DNA sequence: GACGATATTGACGTTAACGTAAACGTAAAC
DNA sequence: GTTTACGTTTACGTTAACGTCAATATCGTC
């Protein structure tokens, strides 16, 4: 077994992130991951540092409820650092959109957290009233 | 037309929240909404203030990526204020769970926003380098 | 009371994100 | 060198959240 410091088998990475093999192959088919192939006939997947990072981003995106396709375009923003001015300006635009979306979501969350606190307060006072 | 201050037809509420009639009927079937029925044979839906409020909560939940079923149990927490101590304590527990979830999500969002800023900075410096 | 606008109830279709089973290859351990 | 564990492809199944007809009813208006 080579030191698994920078590479992972499918079982290792699936276990680390608690996802199924099927999900990993699905992400690969969607173009979100592209593990190397090893073995004489190239019959086994081998995930490297880049895949590892991308998978973490994929799962965070999923926790936030983003569709996989959108997640793909988002994490590609990080990976494909463009060298041309036009593309850079376009990327900056995309960043603004993403930021606006995330800020809206955070506002929704803060709203929800606020209402939860109200409800909690009501509960506590009701409990006191009952004792 | 009675003053639509506290009641809405399906067209009105659908229009206000930019959802389809179909979606409203779906939410109703999931038990998230329960509009009155009006007309002799009770053949038309009439949404009141409570439905209006619940719909707003439903859509916020949807924006945050929650499944409708979970949204249902969440907004029921607000509506069914229990009067018994055991139920109140149970509700307080639920509130903690929900809060933890929302805080995790906010942490994910803040992470993402932070990384976006890094990327933005890189873009800007790359643009300067090119000029 | 005819007619267009609005609403209702089925019922089947669709998309996303995998689950699951089958059938088979390969590597590891004994 | 054969079990045993791990991995692969193919392909059909599933769930959620509606979309999209089609057929029918009813309301408001002239």
Image (cartoon, coloured by chain):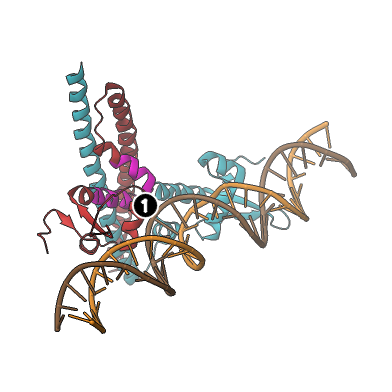
Chain colours: A red, B cyan, C brown, D orange
The extreme top residue here reads: B131
Residue A121: x percent and y percent?
A: 28, 55
Q: Residue at x 19, y 51 (%)?
A: A48
Which quarter of the rendering shows the C terminus of chain B? top left
Q: Quadrant of residue A85?
A: top left
Q: Which chain letter matches label 1?
A: A
Magenta segment, prevailing SS (helix, strand or loop): helix
Q: Which residue is mark 1?
A: A29
Q: Quadrant of residue A44?
A: bottom left
Residue D2: x percent and y percent?
A: 26, 84
Which type of secondary structure does the marked residue at label 1 adopt?
Answer: helix
Along the horizontal axis of the image, is A123 left or right of C3? left
Along the horizontal axis of the image, is B102 left or right of A12? right
Which quarter of the rendering shows the N terminus of chain B? top right
B30 and A119: which one is in front?
A: B30
Q: Residue at x 50, y 47 (%)?
A: B52
Residue B121 vertical placement versus A9 (above, below): above
B18 and B48: which one is in front?
A: B18
Q: Residue at x 40, y 50 (%)?
A: B61
Residue A34 visible somewhere in the drawing: yes
Q: Which residues are magenta?
A: A54-75
A45 and A126: which one is in front?
A: A45
Residue C30: x percent and y percent?
A: 14, 83
Q: Is residue A6 magenta?
A: no
Residue B45: x percent and y percent?
A: 63, 52
B49 and C22: which one is in front?
A: C22
């Amino acid at each position: 077994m080579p030191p698994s410091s920078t590479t992972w088998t499918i079982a290792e990475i699936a276990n680390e992130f608690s996802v199924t093999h099927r999900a990993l192959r699905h992400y690969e088919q969607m173009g979100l991951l592209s593990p190397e192939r090893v073995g004489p006939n190239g019959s086994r997947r081998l995930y490297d540092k880049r895949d590892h990072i991308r998978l973490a981003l994929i799962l965070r995106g999923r926790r936030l409820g983003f569709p996989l396709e959108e997640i793909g375009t988002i994490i590609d923003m990080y990976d494909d650092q463009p060298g041309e001015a036009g593309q850079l300006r376009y990327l900056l635009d995309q960043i603004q959109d993403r930021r606006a979306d995330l800020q809206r979501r955070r506002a929704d969350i803060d709203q929800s957290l606020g209402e939860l606190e109200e409800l909690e307060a009501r509960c506590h006072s009701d409990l006191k009233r009952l004792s």
